[in-house]
Image (spheres, rainbow, N blue to C red):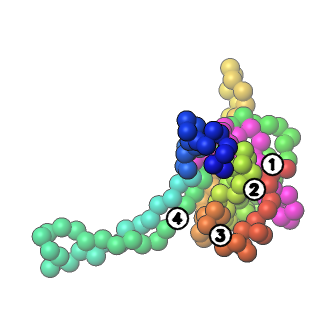
Protein backbone atom coordinates (compact mmCIF):
# COMPACT_ATOMS: atom_id res chain seq x y z
CA UNK A 1 0.00 0.00 0.00
CA UNK A 2 3.04 2.27 0.31
CA UNK A 3 2.77 3.27 -3.37
CA UNK A 4 -0.96 3.92 -3.11
CA UNK A 5 -2.26 7.40 -2.31
CA UNK A 6 1.15 9.01 -2.97
CA UNK A 7 2.65 6.85 -0.19
CA UNK A 8 0.19 8.43 2.27
CA UNK A 9 2.23 11.65 2.40
CA UNK A 10 -0.94 13.75 2.69
CA UNK A 11 -3.79 11.18 2.68
CA UNK A 12 -3.18 8.97 5.66
CA UNK A 13 -6.30 6.94 6.32
CA UNK A 14 -7.10 6.45 10.01
CA UNK A 15 -7.26 2.96 11.55
CA UNK A 16 -10.53 3.68 13.37
CA UNK A 17 -13.31 5.98 12.25
CA UNK A 18 -16.75 6.90 13.57
CA UNK A 19 -19.68 4.96 12.12
CA UNK A 20 -22.77 6.56 10.58
CA UNK A 21 -25.91 5.35 12.34
CA UNK A 22 -27.82 5.22 9.05
CA UNK A 23 -25.75 2.17 8.05
CA UNK A 24 -26.71 0.08 11.10
CA UNK A 25 -29.89 -2.02 10.80
CA UNK A 26 -31.73 -4.28 13.19
CA UNK A 27 -33.00 -7.37 11.42
CA UNK A 28 -34.99 -10.44 12.34
CA UNK A 29 -35.12 -13.91 10.92
CA UNK A 30 -38.46 -15.16 9.66
CA UNK A 31 -40.04 -17.97 11.69
CA UNK A 32 -38.24 -20.81 9.87
CA UNK A 33 -34.86 -19.02 9.83
CA UNK A 34 -34.57 -19.06 6.04
CA UNK A 35 -34.57 -15.29 5.52
CA UNK A 36 -33.07 -12.32 7.37
CA UNK A 37 -35.34 -9.27 7.12
CA UNK A 38 -34.36 -5.67 7.87
CA UNK A 39 -37.25 -4.01 9.67
CA UNK A 40 -38.84 -1.85 6.97
CA UNK A 41 -38.99 1.91 7.55
CA UNK A 42 -36.39 1.85 10.33
CA UNK A 43 -35.22 5.29 11.46
CA UNK A 44 -33.61 4.64 14.83
CA UNK A 45 -31.90 1.91 16.80
CA UNK A 46 -30.84 1.84 20.43
CA UNK A 47 -29.00 -1.11 21.93
CA UNK A 48 -29.17 -1.12 25.73
CA UNK A 49 -26.77 -3.19 27.85
CA UNK A 50 -26.72 -3.15 31.64
CA UNK A 51 -25.61 -5.12 34.67
CA UNK A 52 -27.22 -5.38 38.09
CA UNK A 53 -25.13 -4.55 41.12
CA UNK A 54 -24.97 -6.78 44.17
CA UNK A 55 -24.42 -4.95 47.45
CA UNK A 56 -21.60 -6.61 49.40
CA UNK A 57 -21.33 -3.92 52.09
CA UNK A 58 -20.85 -5.09 55.65
CA UNK A 59 -20.26 -3.43 59.00
CA UNK A 60 -16.53 -3.80 58.56
CA UNK A 61 -16.30 -2.40 55.01
CA UNK A 62 -13.37 0.04 55.01
CA UNK A 63 -14.01 3.76 55.35
CA UNK A 64 -17.80 3.53 55.47
CA UNK A 65 -18.02 3.18 51.69
CA UNK A 66 -20.42 0.78 50.03
CA UNK A 67 -18.96 -2.31 48.42
CA UNK A 68 -20.54 -3.76 45.28
CA UNK A 69 -19.95 -6.37 42.62
CA UNK A 70 -21.38 -7.06 39.19
CA UNK A 71 -24.47 -9.24 39.06
CA UNK A 72 -26.69 -10.42 36.21
CA UNK A 73 -26.39 -8.80 32.78
CA UNK A 74 -29.19 -7.93 30.37
CA UNK A 75 -29.69 -6.32 26.99
CA UNK A 76 -32.52 -4.89 24.97
CA UNK A 77 -33.00 -3.08 21.68
CA UNK A 78 -35.48 -0.40 20.62
CA UNK A 79 -36.29 0.80 17.14
CA UNK A 80 -38.90 2.93 15.42
CA UNK A 81 -39.64 4.42 12.05
CA UNK A 82 -42.14 4.85 9.25
CA UNK A 83 -44.64 1.98 9.14
CA UNK A 84 -44.47 0.23 5.77
CA UNK A 85 -47.82 -1.50 5.50
CA UNK A 86 -47.55 -4.94 3.93
CA UNK A 87 -43.78 -5.25 4.44
CA UNK A 88 -42.70 -8.82 5.18
CA UNK A 89 -40.74 -7.70 8.24
CA UNK A 90 -43.84 -6.12 9.78
CA UNK A 91 -45.89 -9.24 9.03
CA UNK A 92 -43.26 -11.27 10.90
CA UNK A 93 -43.23 -8.81 13.81
CA UNK A 94 -47.01 -9.17 14.10
CA UNK A 95 -46.67 -12.98 14.16
CA UNK A 96 -43.99 -12.84 16.86
CA UNK A 97 -46.00 -10.37 18.91
CA UNK A 98 -49.11 -12.57 18.74
CA UNK A 99 -47.30 -15.86 19.43
CA UNK A 100 -44.82 -14.62 22.04
CA UNK A 101 -42.15 -16.86 20.48
CA UNK A 102 -38.46 -16.03 20.74
CA UNK A 103 -36.96 -14.05 17.85
CA UNK A 104 -33.44 -14.40 16.48
CA UNK A 105 -32.30 -10.84 15.77
CA UNK A 106 -29.16 -9.55 14.14
CA UNK A 107 -27.60 -6.08 13.98
CA UNK A 108 -25.72 -5.47 10.73
CA UNK A 109 -23.67 -2.77 9.06
CA UNK A 110 -25.40 -2.68 5.69
CA UNK A 111 -22.75 -0.46 4.07
CA UNK A 112 -19.90 -2.85 4.84
CA UNK A 113 -22.15 -5.96 4.77
CA UNK A 114 -20.78 -6.86 8.17
CA UNK A 115 -22.48 -8.65 11.06
CA UNK A 116 -22.17 -6.77 14.37
CA UNK A 117 -24.38 -8.36 17.08
CA UNK A 118 -26.94 -11.13 17.37
CA UNK A 119 -29.08 -12.86 19.93
CA UNK A 120 -32.41 -14.29 20.98
CA UNK A 121 -35.08 -11.87 22.17
CA UNK A 122 -38.73 -11.44 23.03
CA UNK A 123 -40.76 -8.73 21.32
CA UNK A 124 -42.10 -6.75 24.29
CA UNK A 125 -43.66 -3.81 22.46
CA UNK A 126 -44.99 -3.31 18.95
CA UNK A 127 -46.82 0.02 18.71
CA UNK A 128 -48.38 1.63 15.66
CA UNK A 129 -49.19 5.33 15.60
CA UNK A 130 -51.25 7.16 12.98
CA UNK A 131 -51.30 10.90 13.73
CA UNK A 132 -53.60 13.24 11.86
CA UNK A 133 -50.80 15.34 10.37
CA UNK A 134 -47.88 12.94 9.91
CA UNK A 135 -46.86 9.56 8.52
CA UNK A 136 -47.92 6.36 10.23
CA UNK A 137 -45.10 5.07 12.44
CA UNK A 138 -44.15 2.01 14.47
CA UNK A 139 -41.99 1.40 17.50
CA UNK A 140 -40.87 -1.89 18.93
CA UNK A 141 -38.75 -3.13 21.80
CA UNK A 142 -36.90 -6.40 22.18
CA UNK A 143 -35.79 -7.87 25.52
CA UNK A 144 -32.77 -10.16 25.28
CA UNK A 145 -33.00 -13.81 26.23
CA UNK A 146 -29.41 -14.82 26.94
CA UNK A 147 -26.33 -13.02 25.65
CA UNK A 148 -26.07 -10.39 22.94
CA UNK A 149 -23.21 -11.93 20.97
CA UNK A 150 -20.53 -9.64 19.54
CA UNK A 151 -20.29 -11.14 16.07
CA UNK A 152 -17.13 -9.18 15.28
CA UNK A 153 -15.26 -11.14 17.96
CA UNK A 154 -16.11 -14.69 16.80
CA UNK A 155 -13.50 -17.29 16.00
CA UNK A 156 -12.68 -17.64 12.31
CA UNK A 157 -14.62 -20.92 12.13
CA UNK A 158 -17.76 -19.49 13.79
CA UNK A 159 -17.53 -16.23 11.79
CA UNK A 160 -17.57 -18.25 8.57
CA UNK A 161 -21.03 -19.56 9.52
CA UNK A 162 -22.48 -16.06 10.08
CA UNK A 163 -23.33 -15.08 6.54
CA UNK A 164 -27.00 -14.04 6.36
CA UNK A 165 -27.61 -10.46 5.21
CA UNK A 166 -31.00 -8.79 4.93
CA UNK A 167 -33.09 -9.55 1.87
Q: Residue at x 39, y 71 (%)?
A: 70
Q: Earlier in the sequence, mark 1 or mark 3?
A: 1
Q: Find numbered disc 1 in the image and state the secondary structure of the residue it sits on.
A: helix
Few, some or many C-alpha atoms within 10 Å of disc 3 (few <14, some 14-19, many ≥20)?
Answer: few
Question: What residue is disc 3 on?
Answer: 154
Question: What residue is disc 1 on?
Answer: 89
- Mark 1 or 3, closer to the camera: 3
How far apart marks 4 and 3 lie (CA) works out to 20 Å
The residue sitting at the top extreme is: 133
Residue 83's quadrant in the figure? top right
Q: Find numbered disc 2 in the image and state the secondary structure of the residue it sits on.
A: strand
Nearer the observer, 151 or 41: 151
Q: Earlier in the sequence, mark 1 or mark 4?
A: 4
Q: Earlier in the sequence, mark 4 or mark 3?
A: 4
How far apart marks 1 and 4 lie (CA) works out to 25 Å
Few, some or many C-alpha atoms within 10 Å of disc 4 (few <14, some 14-19, many ≥20)?
Answer: some
How far apart marks 2 and 1 lie (CA) works out to 8 Å
Magenta span of residues: 20-46
Residue 43's quadrant in the figure? top right
- Check contact, mark 2 vs mark 1: CB within 8 A: yes
Q: Find numbered disc 3 in the image and state the secondary structure of the residue it sits on.
A: loop
Amino acid sequence: MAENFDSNVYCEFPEAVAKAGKDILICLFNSDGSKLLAIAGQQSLTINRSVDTVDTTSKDTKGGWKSQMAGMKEWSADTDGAYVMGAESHKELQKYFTSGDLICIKIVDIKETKSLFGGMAVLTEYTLEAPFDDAMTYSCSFAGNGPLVDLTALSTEAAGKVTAMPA
